Amino acid sequence: MNKVKNMIGYQSEFFEVLGQSDKTDKSYCTYWYCQCTCGRLFEARGHDIRRGRQKSCGCLSERKTRKHGALSKNARPEARKTYTSWSNMLARCYNPKSTSYRYYGAKGVSVCARWNPKAGGSFANFLADIGYRPFGATISRWLDTGNYEPGNCLWQTREQQELHRFCKRILREYPVPALYGLRTAGSPQPTI
């Protein structure tokens, strides 16, 4: 069995280790008594403390959910799903570790400042512009082009998104200049 590393006095941003607990788990990992900045006492695994996985007593995640209420336990299910869509949209555009980043952020797709929290936007603005996520729908951009912004985004089902991809492919193979507002050489101005 390994020698226990003394962690008394260790301080993180949100808690301080006060002493060793008698509790151990199946893998014989030692637990420590900690005091959070909010005042609560809690026990945490030494392994999690050393690796930075233990952030607080849990109040840090509560603070995050209180910010807009979409993740709280008593929030509407639509609010949680809408928040997840918003969060995933941001990750696709700005987090290189996201599996979808290469299709969005790496190609220059961005989120408008009104919805981007790093640019002063918020989830509340997103919710006001787009509304709650309907059952079975996901966030989509018109014909999968442009950025994520109020005039270019809508909730669509998978079938609707597949139809848009099909239309986009057809327009790429058989371009119709009038749809794009363009004129070819020698053609008259299109009238709509």
Image (cartoon, helix red, strand yellow):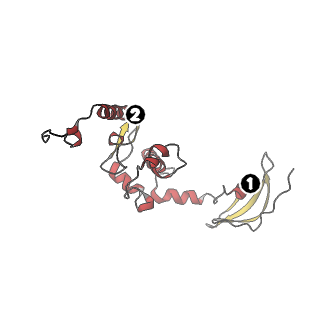
Task: Name the quadrant containing residue 141.
Answer: top left
Mark 2 lies on residue:
158
Q: Label 1 crowding class (10 Å Cα cut-off): few <14, some 14-19, many 20+?
A: some
Q: Label 2 is placed on what type of residue?
A: Arg
Residue 16 at x, y percent in the picture? 70, 66
Badge 2 density bin: few <14, some 14–19, many ≥20, Cα 10 Å: few
Residue 94 rendering spot, x and y as whole percentages: 48, 52
Give, as a three-letter code, the residue at label 1.
Answer: His
Q: Position of residue 179 (x, y in %)?
A: 22, 39
Q: Which secondary structure lies at badge 1?
A: helix
Q: Which mark is residue 191?
A: none
User: Which comes before the other along the chain, label 2 or label 1?
Assistant: 1
Q: Quadrant of residue 167?
A: top left
What is the residue that sits farthest to the front in this orientation? 185
Name the residue nearer the viewer: 137 or 36: 137
**Would you say 106 lies left or right of 59 here?**
left
Q: Would you identify the image quadrant in which residue 60 lies?
A: bottom right
Gap in angstroms between the C-alphas marked 2 and 1: 43 Å
Which mark, by number, is residue 47?
1
Instruction: Tell whether 57 sits left or right of 102.
Output: right
